[in-house]
Amino acid sequence: GQYSAVFRYDVMTSILKAFSTVFSGQSAMKKLTLLIISLVATLNMYAQNADEIKSEILELSHKKWELMANKDATALKDIFHEQAVFVHMGGYWGTEQELTTIDRGFIHYKHADIQSEEVRIAENSVTLNSALTLTAMVGGREVITPFFVTEVYLKQDGVWKLTVLAFTSRPQMRANQE
């Protein structure tokens, strides 16, 4: 469900231990009522946190596509983890090669037309799966390619960093199927 992505067993255990210590002298009915109120408040807090994380990741991803279109390798360096991997149709490589590829225009990501996005949260990492059509200049010619794109972000020192950007080709859809 919505809460499972960010609701952890260890958090629940800590809440129950603190609850039993604080309310040890209360009646069973009062304890149960207070426990339910505490759990609902905690679940709401985690749901809000999940929504905030999803918004933050979507905003960061959209910013990344814009920076890639502008060939701004300097700003992208702040988004890309130093050990990130970039998986393309012709191979895979690390952060420095991706930044060089963008900076020198070997691949110019001109525009990403995003059709769908799904964010999944797992502890301190987030996976964003997208279906998009990418317009790019590759080898001096413009190509328009439909992709499934997977982006994985890791929170490092309070900042989200892109650790994986993987492109998987998807079948061309006829106009009446989209």
Image (spheres, rainbow, N blue to C red):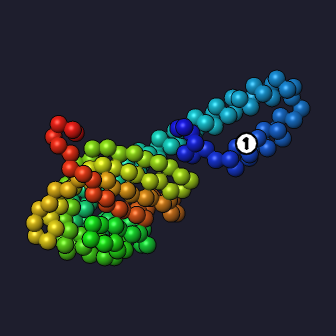
Q: Residue furthest right?
A: 25
Specify whether 10 is left or right of 60: right
Name the residue: 73% across, 42% down: 15
Which residue is at 55% across, 45% downward?
A: 5
Q: Residue at x 70, y 50 (%)?
A: 10
Q: Is residue 152 above or below residue 42?
A: below
Residue at 35% from the left image edge and 62% from the top image edge? 166
- Give 68 or 119, whichever is nearer the viewer: 119
Residue 128 in view in this figure = yes
Expressed as whole percent of the image width and height from the top left, the position of residue 106 reads: 19, 72
The answer, for residue 112, to whether it is visible in the render is: no
Disc 1 element = helix
- Residue 80: quarter of image: bottom left
In this view, which residue lies farthest toward the top? 29
Classify residue 116 by image quadrant.
top left
Disc 1 residue type? Answer: Ile
In the picture of the structure, the residue carrying the numbered disc 1 is 15
> Looking at the picture, how far across and down is residue 12, in whole percent?
70, 43
| Residue 107 to residue 63: above or below | below
Residue 74 in the figure: left or right of residue 39? left
For the C terminus, the image quarter is: top left
> Is 44 displayed left or right of 69 in the figure?
right
Closer-to-camera residue (120/76): 120
Q: Position of residue 17 (x, y in %)?
A: 79, 44
User: For this view, does 30 lie left or right of residue 118?
Assistant: right
* Quadrant for the N terminus in the image: top right
